[in-house]
Image (tube, rainbow, N blue to C red):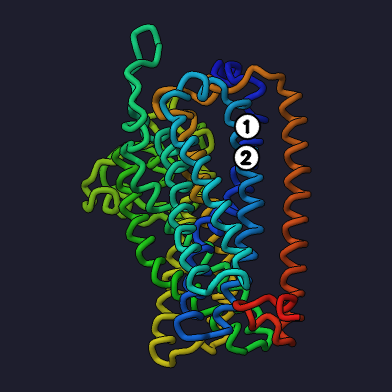
Amino acid sequence: MNPTVLAVPAQLLPAREQMAFTLMFHIIFVPFGVALPAMMLIANYKGLRRNDSVALRLARRWSHAAGLLFAVGAASGTVLSFEMGLLWPGLTGRFGEVFGLPFAIEGLGFFLEAILVAIYIFGWRRLRPWTHFWLGVPIPFVALVGAFSIISANAWMNQPAGFTISPTGEITDVDPIAAIFNDALWYELLHFVLAAYMAAAFTLASIYVVGWLRGRRDRYHRLGILIPLTIGAVLTPIQFVVGDLIAVAIFQDQPAKFAAMEVVTNSGTHQPEVLYGIYDSATNTVKGGISIPGLDSLLAGNSVDTYVPGLDQFPDAKPSNVTIVHWAFDTMAGIGTVLILLALWFGIAYWRKRDVPGNRLFLWFAASSGVLTYIAVECGWIVTEVGRQPWVVYNILRTEDAVTDANATGLWVSFTVVLLLYLVLAVGTVAVLRAMSRRWRASDRTDDEDAVYGPRPEVLK
């Protein structure tokens, strides 16, 4: 029997499962918190600039949705903060002084964003139009502060910096600024912010595309499609280039993760690009999949002669589930490629007719884009987090050494409680969004919603 298996503590699996579930739930709301304020302000500006009541109505409704999703995201993110300390005391206790500052910055950003979002939402019909708009302008930038701080902490786990480990194992010479601005920060941050804007944009557009397919082809739905779809179409090619640069950076900084992403089994040159396939850890081989000769070496170093370290070089430090990492990476890259086709189709069609493309295949394609981008976002986090295993701090602290000493049964119970709580939270969020949608559609038959600025109706009485 493998002695490594015996060394794994029983509480590691429930701790990892709970953390993974909480992260994957929370990430659903983050793109809306980061990107939706910018889109509502674009609609707000368009409405004020051109005296467009339809654009103003969109901005007001998007602000209400943004407020709800921000609140749910904040609640699920708060649970994550507790889990960091309770499930991984070996990480927070030993390295909290090094990478704790971004969490403090994130907290300040959260409070400031909450205040600004509340002012903006309650400012409709209470503030002068341009005053209301300018009070909302800081929201997208404050949201970026929160994204910056969290991504900085995660990037530090991938590229630890800003400290020294003494011969006795103590953490010394702590430099929080060097820890924040670690080598992985900029490419992780840029990749994530682009992904957040794409996810929010394509999801928002897909909602109105569904209405368009059902025959609601009015100006309200036209703007609801064109504003976010234009943003998504512009950002998608940029994301594709950034993603390629990040893969090269990971090839240089975390070769074991790159080997898992591309399922490179044996080190060498002329490595093929393998699409999907099942990795067999017992024989270090891949079963099935589509192999493209030399492409992996070419993408990693612009030459088929590029030497790529394989999983054979990391027998004790390769990701615990190579197939999951590899499939997640291929799925993310595949969805990115599909979205580029959608962006090109939309760009050409709009350039020719200055309207929403009428082709039903395009509309079905656009209607599914929101789900596709969220699958890509989840896959990206799987590549980042599962791909770093068995390290919680790359090459320094193994995950099994950071986990709590709590009883495994107790952790399974707490995981079950978290599952139930988040199920209630998800059902409640969907119910409120559906109620908002029904109320908005009913109000479309009146003139009240057009008057988003000016004295409130009861003031006039």
Taking the image as drawn, is residue 198 in sight? no
The disc label shown at residue 78, or none: 2
Question: Which residue lies at the image location 56% right of the left edge and 19% below the top edge?
Answer: 2
Question: Which residue lies at the image location 64% right of the left edge and 36% below the top edge?
Answer: 17
- Helix, strand or loop for disc 2: helix
Vertical side of 428 occupied by 258: above or below: above
When asked about the image quadrant of residue 418, the answer is top right
When asked about the image quadrant of residue 19, the answer is top right
Vertical side of 147 occupied by 405: above or below: above
Q: Residues within 10 Å of mark 2 (few under 14, many from 20)?
A: few
In the image, farthest residue toward the bottom: 353
Image coordinates for residue 160, horizontal then vertical, percent: 37, 30
In the image, farthest residue toward the top: 168
Q: Are marks 1 and 2 in contact (CB under 8 Å)?
A: yes
The disc label shown at residue 221, or none: none
Q: Amino acid at mark 1?
A: Phe
Which residue position is annotated with label 1? 82
Question: Which residue lies at the image location 43% right of the left edge and 41% below the top edge?
Answer: 260
- Helix, strand or loop for disc 1: helix
Side of 442 relative to 92 (left or right): right
Image coordinates for residue 158, horizontal then vertical, percent: 40, 35
Image coordinates for residue 221, horizontal then vertical, percent: 60, 82
Nearer-the-camera pick, 373 or 44: 44
